[in-house]
Image: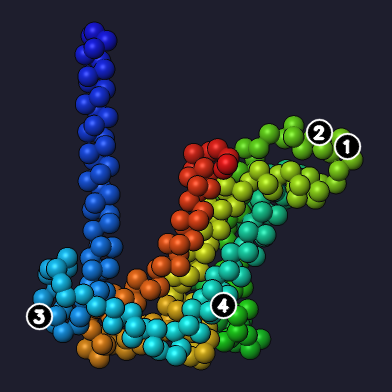
Amino acid sequence: MSADTYRRGRSLGDRAILVAVVALTLVWIAPIVWVLGLSLKPNEVLMRTTGGLLSPPFTLKNYADIIASSSVFGWMMNSTIVAAGQTILTLVLASLAGYGFARTDFPGRGVLFVVVLAALAVPEQAIIVPLHTMFAFFEWHNTYGALIAPRLAFPFGVLLMTQYFRAISPEIEEAALLDSASRFKVFWRIVLPLSIPAQATLGIYTFLHAWNDYFWPLVSATKPEMYTLTIGLASMQTNFAQTEGIGFLMAQAVFAGLPVLILYLFFQRHIISAVSGGSAR
């Protein structure tokens, strides 16, 4: 096979891959465009047909109705506090635990790490009853602590940080330890800054999970003033026949998803860097 033939074949292969990626991207964003289009259409129009998303009339009334609710911003604040609290505390705990597994040798380390991995296979539904009973006994329900604490046991975060710390060359730490630096100082000043891509990835994943969490807040938050955004928006719907229309429902979906999208846009370079195995710059 000549070099020209090889290059032409490779070029055709690259183009085929590009076409496939573009096609998959269009398939992936189609539901998002559909939801956004419906959220901008008057409900009386959607009662007749859900077609013609790109043709007028358009309206912002669905979003205005959401903002007009006096409770929405309170629910958003609850979601922000819960998601930010879970994210920060998970990063702290997962980083410390991951560094301990990756760099320190203590009795039972292997067994304990296996237990952490085994926790990945335990479904949330299996522990919901004892979890609810425990928090009810301590009268912690309808508090931020009750909404945050159960999600801090995050085995995936420990696994991610352990693997990332193991990939960092230990010679960097050994040089600092020889200069009489403490283990915690090495972790804080040297290792932690090198793990920013993994931290950003874990932070985005944790925040996204906390922001969209529905099951546990539904169990723990029974007072309207403690609802998170997902529970609050669901409470506005009651059942489909009594809602204010399909456009209103779609506007709720867009409204709830925007903060996560904005957060991802700010940290996407770190996520891409973590996936590629490099360091963000």
Contact flag, marks 3 and 4 (Cβ < 8 Å):
no
Find the distance from the CA under tag 3 to the CA under tag 2: 72 Å
Contact flag, marks 1 and 4 (Cβ < 8 Å):
no
The amino acid pointed to by label 3 is Arg
Q: Residue at x 50, y 47 (%)?
A: 269
Q: Which is more N-terminal, label 4 or label 3?
A: 3
The relative height of residue 186 versus residue 250 in the rendered view (above or below) is above
User: Which circle, 1 or 4, is nearer the viewer?
Assistant: 1
The relative height of residue 182 versus residue 213 in the rendered view (above or below) is above
Q: Secondary structure at mark 4?
A: helix
Please name the residue that numbered disc 2 is placed on.
Answer: 175
Confirm whether residue 122 shows in the render. Answer: no
Percent coordinates x, y for residue 174 in the rendering: 79, 35
Q: Which mark is residue 48?
A: 3
Contact flag, marks 2 and 1 (Cβ < 8 Å):
yes
Please tell me how crowded label 1 is: few (under 14), some (14-19), or many (20+) other residues with Cα within 10 Å.
few
The relative height of residue 32 versus residue 224 in the rendered view (above or below) is above
Identify the image quadrant of the C terminus.
top right
Q: Secondary structure at mark 3?
A: loop
Q: Which is more N-terminal, label 3 or label 1?
A: 3
Please name the residue that numbered disc 4 is placed on.
Answer: 147
Q: Which is more N-terminal, label 4 or label 2?
A: 4
Confirm whether residue 281 shows in the render. Answer: yes
Seen as rendered, the residue at the extreme top is 2
Q: Residue at x 16, y 79 (%)?
A: 46
Q: Which is more N-terminal, label 4 or label 1?
A: 4
Percent coordinates x, y for residue 60 in the rendering: 29, 78
User: Which circle, 3 or 2, is nearer the viewer?
Assistant: 3
Contact flag, marks 3 and 2 (Cβ < 8 Å):
no
Front position in the image: 236 or 164: 236
Percent coordinates x, y for residue 255 in the rendering: 38, 73
